[in-house]
Each structure stands twice: as C-alpha cells, then as structure tokens.
Image (tube, helix red, strand yellow):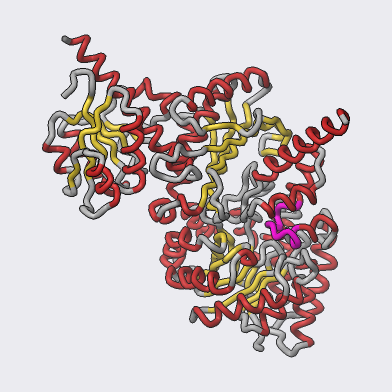
Amino acid sequence: MKAPRLTDTTLRDGSHPMRHQFTREQVASIVQALDRAGVPVIEVSHGDGLAGSSLQYGFSHTSEFDLIETARSHAERAKIAALMLPGIGTRQELKEAVARGIQVVRIATQCTEADVSEQHFGLAKELGLETVGFLMMAHMRPPEALAEQAKLMESYGADCVYIVDSAGAMLPRDAAARVRALKEAISVQVGFHAHNNLGLGIGNTLAALEAGADQIDGCLRGLGAGAGNAATELLAAVLDRLGLNPGLDVFGLMDAAEYIVAPIMPFQPFPDRDAITIGYAGVYSTFLLHAKRAGAQYGVDPREILVELGRRQAVAGQEDWIIDVALDLSRRHSAGERKESRA
Amino acid sequence: MQADKIKVAILGSGNIGADLMYKLLRQPGPMELALVAGIDPASEGLARARQLGIATSANGIEAILADPDIRIVFDATSAKAHVRHAKLLRESGRIAIDLTPAARGPYVVPPVNLGDHLRAANVNLITCGGQATIPLVYAVSRVTPVRYAEMVSTVASRSAGPGTRQNIDEFTFTTARGLEAIGGAREAKAIIILNPANPPILMRNTIYVIPEGDFDVAAVQESVAQMVADVQHYVPGYRLKNLPVIERRATPWGERPVVIMLLEVEGAGDFLPPYAGNLDIMTAAARRVGELFAAHLLANVEVTA
C-alpha cells in the first residue's frame, strides 16, 4: 500500500445535509483549515454538481461560483475542485467554474453511462484542468462492466477514475474487487469514494487502498449525503497509524471537524434506520432527506419509499421518483384500508 | 398524384426515420409518403421501405430535390446534415420539418403554437423532452403567469442513441429555451437522466412549475387535463400518473406553492419498442405537424383555385 491522495468533499457532498445553504464565511473557514492541515484537493459545488441548484435537488443559498471564488482565495496550497454531472451541468457552467478558480473537475455519470461525458472531458482538457471520472452507483454493476466504462473515461482524457459507492451499499470485498478491476484495465489513477450507510465508510476505503486505490475521498465529521462519507479526520488518523500518512495534520483535521464543521451541521449524519435502508436497498444516498420529506407529506414510511426505489432500480439524480413512489404507496395503503374496513 | 393528398418524403433511414415511416403509413391523413431517402443502401430502414413498396434512394437529399411533387420533407438525419439540407430545401421551395437539434426554423409544439407557423418554410421539433413537457408548462401559463419551470426527463438508456449522448448539453439548453419561449415560463431549467434498468423503463418526465402569484388550483388542473387530452390525440401513450399535486417548497422567491406533474410517455410501438416514448413523441409530433401543414396547403390550393 502507498500513501493515497485525499480529496475533501465536505463543501460538495456535505452540501446535501446542509440543504445547499453553505455561506461564503463557512466556506472560507473550512477551506483555510483544510489547506493548513495539508489536504491537497478541496471540492466545492452544489451537492449535485455544477448547476444542481433546482427544485429537483434543492436551491443553493449562495451561488456555487461565489463559493468557488471564496475557496480559491483562501487556499494557499490546495487545489479547488468542482463536481459536474452531464445532464444537469453543462460546459457553460464548467467554463464559469474555471473562470472562478477551479483547477480540477470531477465528471460524474451513472456507472453504465460514461459515454455522456466525452464532450465535458474534452473541454476540461482544453482548459488545462486535472480531470477525474466518477462512476456513480458502482455497486449496481460487476467489476468487469465498470472496467469497460472506466476505459471510456480514460479515452476521453480522465487522469483518474473513481469507483463511487453512492449508495454506501458495498461490502469491503465489493470495493476491493471493483478497484482491482480498474487498476488492471486502465493506466491512469484509480480512486474510491465511500458512503457510510452500512457503517463501512472507513472499512471500504481501506479495502480499496489494499486493492491499489491511488486516491480517496473524505468529509470532515463525515458531513455528506445519507449516513455521510468516510470522515476526513478519521482517515487521517487511520492512515497515520498505518504508516501511510500523505502529509496530513491529524490533530489539525480533528480540530477542524470538532470546532468548525460540527457547530454548523444541522444534524450528525449517522447510519440510523433510514440511512441503513439506503445502503441495504442500494439507492442514492441523497434520497435520504427527500424521502423523509415526501414520507411526512404523503403519510408514508420513508423506509418503504427507499426500498421501493431500490426495487425500481432508480439511479443517481432521480429524486423526482420519490414523489411518484410516495403517491403510489399512499394510494396502495388507502386502498388496503378501504378493503379492511369493508371486511 | 391524388388531388387530395400532399406528397411527403422522409430524409434519414435510421430508427427515427423508420418509426415515422410506419406512422405515416398507418395514419397518412392528407399526406402520401412518396419517398424514403437515406445514405446507407444497406440500412434496415431502407430495406423495410422497399418491402412496403415505397420508393427509396440511398443518395440522400438528391432524390427529393429531383421530385418537384414532394412538398414536405421530414428530416431525421443529424443537426449537422440538416444545416445543409435546410438551405437546399428552402431554395427548392419545400417545407422542412426538422427532427434534429439544428433549429434553423421556429420551434413548434403542435397543440401550443403550430398555428402560428403554418407559413414557415422550416420548423423545428425542439427535443423529445420539450415535446413532452412544454405542453404542460403552457397549460399552466395560459391560466396564470409562470415565474419558473423545471423539467426532469428520465429515459431508458437503450433509447438514447449516440446523437443524444454526445450532445447532452444541447438537450438541456434547447429544452430549457423551449420551456421559456413556448411554454411561457419566465425562467426554466431542464435535466436529463439515463436509466439503465432492465426491463427498460417507460419515458418519465417530472414537471415543476412555480406560478408568479396566487392561482386557482382547479383552473390549473382543468387546463392541464385539457392539454393532456389534446396531446393524446397524436400521442396515445401520453398520460399523467396523478392529478397535478401542489407542494410548498423553499425557492429563491421565498416559500412558494409548486405545481408538480408526473408524466409518463409510452410509445405506440410502431417500429421502436414501447418504452422508447421519448422517440415516439418526436415521430408522432412530426406526423401531426406534417398533417397540419398538408391540410393547410390543400386548403390554400382550394382558395386560389
């Protein structure tokens, strides 16, 4: 094993539990702390990537371009990254993000649909960016299928391709097999992005490292969608104990998590009943808060909504199906009650 | 030529051209399909046309230009090819119905604004998502002004061809522009998602609309129901899964009631499979546009005769 490169995505994946309400002040203090603690890449954007601000995913409090600009101005060493999902964000927003200071773009597609990202990788390379491909919901396909998709991203110009466990549904052996398949198939770097829905955020990241992952992701205090991500400060402590610390200030990150991020979090992401369901049913982690809201609105158990979404094979970004499922379940229940009252 | 028919041709013998061919044969209205033209003599679309006894050509637009009786041409090629075709068709006085994203002529959605463009030489059908969702945004905006509209289109991976995949940004730009210009929203956003589920999912669209101020919910629902019925005339598989629901949401304009419509489009299965409602609604809209242009041409002939 070798010391991995770490990307902190508190200011992107953490945008979900923050309901996309990050302010410039919060971004400034978090970026300063991460930069000082030696984190080499800091991702900043709406949780659903550039142009994610919408009714579908939630409107941003502050424009992500303003947040990127703030992040850039407070980072002395770290590179600033943004996420983009083709189909939501376009080359137009990518250009704007570059103008405001990003140096890395992470381009994410459903793990079967890498070919929608060709034009975005093309532009990113033209603009001189470091590029990362994100194969989302990677638990849904076997390692060999993911390797084929990773090869496409490599051919479009990706400098690294990530296995993204968007649902936090993988077991350590799943993470390892997928990373290994990519390591064998492509010559660029391989990364792994974990969610903690089954309590395996750190464990899966370690399994990925053992399988050869070059890059990993974390969020301070695990602040991310669903039960959150692998906690950056925990990763730092564990890597240090393993003798693989890539230059992170372990205490500095612990302090940033405790004194900067914890006080602004609306809640501590945790594998509770509904978050475990996300990992167990294999659905997109960001469905958590949307399912809770729809459950309350239409009188349906969020767990039932999440399980049904898994059965329908919902993929990344399909938050609108939550309303549909909630309405269907609510109708089914009232039909059941009518039957019972007749009996 | 039958006096009560207008001769039409299909340019492009891929999936879209072939599906449109079956629609024109099944429901010709005042049109007579005179020619299917492609560039690949071995294409399945041309082979099927020949089997059905329709004249074909593998020389692209040339055979169409050589037949002065062809008045209307459906272009199901590519945006790049249509830029060239548009010029040639205009110069030779033919009406072009453009199914590509080239947008050389005005955008049309049959039940919304086609009447305004029956004298145009070239009309464009926007995108599949636009054909599906613009009618519903318009159904709201004709009752109450619309501050913001957003559509999310989810289509089966297998129904999204290389053209869509390599130009996914154009889908979002063009659809959003259509929601504004024709749907009547002051501002709009479009999102597209490809879903690889097996068996493939039917095309699904969610439409969110934020009216400018207070509005009459019953009037909105009635207008939407009427519009769904109007679209069903030419796309039988077009249906709302629910009555429009109203949810209060946090928006940049404060907490506001949002009208949410869940739309499903099942294809007629003429050539393409029924799950590909996204392709069916394009060919069905094209046929409908052709029918109205042809009727308009015939009516004008009668007037001048």
Query: Residue shown at 46%/69% (left/top)?
Result: A152
In the rendered structure, the answer to whether residue A122 lies left or right of residue A30 reads left
The quadrant of the picture occupied by the N terminus of chain A is bottom right
Residue A23 visible in the current orientation: no
The quadrant of the picture occupied by the C terminus of chain A is top right
The quadrant in which residue A17 appears is bottom right
Q: Nearer the viewer, residue B180 or B15?
A: B15
Residue A22, given in percent of the width and then of the height, sits at 72, 53
Verify whether residue A281 appears in magenta.
yes
Verify whether residue B113 appears in magenta.
no
The total number of labels drawn is 0
In the rendered structure, the answer to whether residue A162 lies left or right of residue B131 reads right
Query: Residue shown at 45%/51% (left/top)?
Result: B160
Query: Residue shown at 46%/61% (left/top)?
Result: A115
Magenta-drawn segment? A278-288
Residue A147, given in percent of the width and then of the height, sits at 52, 73
Q: What is the residue that sits farthest to the front in this orientation?
A: A343
In the rendered structure, the answer to whether residue A255 lies left or right of residue B26 reads right
The quadrant in which residue A16 appears is bottom right
Residue A343 visible in the current orientation: yes
Residue B196, given in percent of the width and then of the height, sits at 54, 56
Query: Residue shown at 45%/70% (left/top)?
Result: A157
Q: Which of B93 and B77 is in front in this view?
A: B77
The quadrant in which residue A196 appears is bottom right
The correct choice, above or below, for B229 with respect to A189 in the image is above
Q: Nearer the viewer, residue A28 or A48?
A: A48
Residue B111, given in percent of the width and then of the height, sits at 44, 24
Q: Nearer the viewer, residue B284 or B87?
A: B284
